[in-house]
């Protein structure tokens, strides 16, 4: 790479101001539209069952290429691409459903004496996982990985609009949202372990730190490898993203130890979402109280030998990313557990109330026998009210609630009578935290709505095998593969991006050739992901 071309590449991603939030929403709406199209084709026509080579190609075109085209060819008119996805969806709905193959029922189990076993309806679902695999979460995380991997290479081509690239200091862009969404999704993954530990013995702070360091070490090594390759190969870099030596892998590596240290606070705080907002408030107060801090982050020189001045973006933005991570944990804590059936909940409470009444009657009888001269105490009112409406914290209503809360906070912070803040990914300020949390909550709500409408009986199964089959039928294999080995595929995407940029001048490439390279690049990533899924390999980093 010549010095002139390197300077040209750095200039192409420098001093950018981003674009409109609503355009970003329209572009990213392609992912739910593709998920809806996939779901209807699968439910009505069984297109992806069995999963043949042609089904895999259709899956790739629908869930990978649609997102890639939304950020490139159709960047100026994403509503057209959304329409192209909705049309076959409507057509599939109007067609009669495909005939389903009848599967032979397994013979009933028998007792040792040869008699048929009695059904155990009361305990049929007792062995179901309290933290089930939910297809809409898999689809959300898979789509987030696809758009992230597509953008990190597409940004090097002219066909990728500059308004979608990372902003310099203030503004909103697709890639700014991609970075925050990656952290938000990582927080959701961390919530699963948090939920598992709630019912087990709490570990000491030392044990938690050791476990978090084991998780952080591979990410820290990846950060060092990226730093060495960028500096050693004289690769073009935009230092105002994170700093001279800092990169995104270092930010990811520090999140787990930070959560381990904050664990006592997380256990007593009533809401993770509220804690994320309060951290964002503290960040903004810090930025507003010290008048020179914003100028220091954005405008000051990078003094040789001064590590903080050279990496100030990565250092000061970490608190904001930590808030987003905790916001993602809050979302995961609410949507990962299995929903409680309201009728079953009423029955349990009625049974408890009846048992309590029986105990009260026995206590009164015993008191009358022991002290017959004493007046009987008044009967204690029953706490159960059969006519009282109940609103359980289901996944859907949890997402509705928090999407509304984050949206109201976004309006307050950025648009109406609030402080009128500008979004800054570079500082990860309060407006950026709220925007990322609101966007991802809304995306999860869309994916959840699609699943609830098209596959409403996934979690009604009475045994693990049936539920596993229903989950498999409702999940795109491509999305499942990207979700399963997301971080490994992200690393591979970075390596392929560097290889492409070192072997060809992407900035001088025409649109047609650029799309050939990008589709081939996404094809390689998808093929690797599907191969790992086929071989049942999970790469933990």
Image: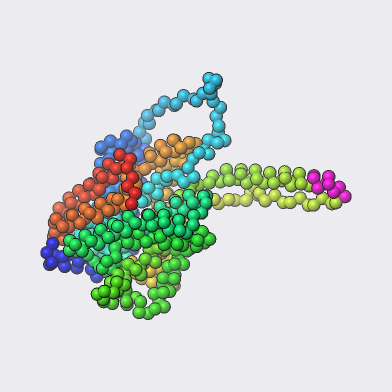
On the picture, is 527 further left or further right than 434?
left
On the picture, is 453 further left or further right than 481?
right
From the top left corner, tell me how far across and down residue 146 is, in percent: 29, 51
User: Residue 242 occupies which quadrant of the picture?
Assistant: bottom left
> 431 and 152: which one is in front?
152
Can residue 360 be seen here? The reply is: yes
> 75 and 168: which one is in front?
168
From the top left corner, tell me how far across and down residue 439 is, in percent: 38, 59
Which stretch did the figure color magenta?
365-373
> 452 and 88: which one is in front?
452
300 versus 505 height, above or below: below
- Does the magenta-highlighted stretch encompass residue 371? yes
Q: How is the image coloured?
A: rainbow
On the picture, is 303 further left or further right than 447?
left
Can residue 437 be seen here? The reply is: no
From the top left corner, tell me how far across and down residue 230 is, in percent: 21, 62
Q: Main secondary structure of the magenta part?
A: helix
């Amino acid at each position: 790479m010549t010095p002139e071309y390197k300077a040209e590449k750095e200039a192409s991603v420098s001093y950018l101001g981003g674009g409109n939030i609503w355009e970003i929403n329209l572009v990213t709406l392609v992912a739910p539209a593709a998920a809806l199209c996939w779901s209807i084709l699968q439910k009505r026509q069984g297109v992806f069952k069995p999963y043949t080579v042609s089904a895999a190609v259709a899956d790739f075109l629908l869930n990978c290429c649609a997102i890639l085209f939304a950020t490139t060819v159709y960047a100026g008119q994403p509503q057209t691409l959304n329409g192209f996805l909705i049309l076959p969806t409507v057509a599939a709905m109007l067609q009669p459903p495909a005939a389903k193959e009848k599967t032979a029922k397994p013979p009933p189990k028998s007792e040792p004496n040869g008699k048929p076993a009695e059904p155990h309806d009361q305990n049929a679902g007792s062995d179901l996982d309290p933290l089930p695999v939910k297809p809409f979460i898999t689809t959300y995380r898979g789509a987030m990985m696809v758009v992230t991997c597509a953008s990190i290479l597409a940004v090097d081509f002219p066909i990728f609009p500059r308004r979608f690239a990372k902003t310099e200091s203030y503004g909103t862009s697709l890639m700014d949202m991609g970075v925050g969404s990656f952290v938000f999704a990582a927080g959701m993954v961390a919530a699963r372990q948090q939920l598992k530990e709630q019912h087990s013995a709490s570990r000491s702070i030392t044990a938690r730190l050791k476990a978090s360091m084991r998780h952080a070490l591979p990410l820290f090594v990846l950060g060092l490898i990226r730093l060495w390759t960028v500096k050693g190969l004289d690769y073009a870099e935009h230092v105002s993203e994170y700093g001279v030596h800092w990169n995104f892998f270092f930010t990811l590596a520090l999140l787990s130890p930070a959560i381990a240290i904050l664990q006592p606070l997380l256990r007593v705080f009533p809401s993770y979402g509220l804690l994320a907002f309060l951290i964002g408030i503290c960040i903004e107060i810090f930025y507003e109280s010290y008048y020179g801090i914003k100028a220091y982050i954005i405008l000051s020189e990078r003094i040789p030998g001064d590590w903080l001045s050279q990496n100030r973006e990565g250092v000061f933005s970490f608190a904001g990313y930590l808030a987003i991570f905790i916001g993602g944990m809050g979302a995961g804590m609410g949507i990962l557990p299995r929903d409680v059936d309201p009728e079953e909940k009423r029955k349990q409470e009625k049974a408890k109330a009846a048992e309590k009444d029986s105990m009260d009657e026995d206590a009164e009888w015993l008191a009358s026998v022991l002290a017959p001269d004493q007046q009987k105490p008044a009967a204690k009112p029953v706490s159960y009210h059969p006519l009282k409406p109940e609103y359980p914290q289901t996944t859907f209503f949890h997402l509705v609630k928090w999407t509304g809360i984050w949206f109201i906070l976004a309006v307050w912070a950025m648009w109406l009578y609030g402080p009128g803040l500008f979004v800054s990914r570079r500082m990860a300020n309060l407006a950026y935290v709220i925007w990322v949390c609101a966007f991802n909550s809304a995306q999860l709500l869309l994916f959840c709505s699609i699943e609830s409408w098209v596959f409403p009986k996934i979690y009604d199964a009475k045994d693990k095998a049936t539920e596993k089959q229903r989950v498999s039928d409702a999940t795109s294999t491509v999305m499942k593969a990207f979700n399963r080995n997301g971080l490994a595929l992200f690393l591979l995407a970075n390596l392929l991006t560097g290889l492409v940029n070192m072997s060809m001048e992407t900035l001088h490439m025409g649109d047609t050739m650029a799309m050939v390279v990008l589709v081939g690049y996404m094809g390689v990533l998808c093929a690797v992901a599907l191969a790992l899924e086929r071989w049942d390999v999970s790469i933990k980093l």
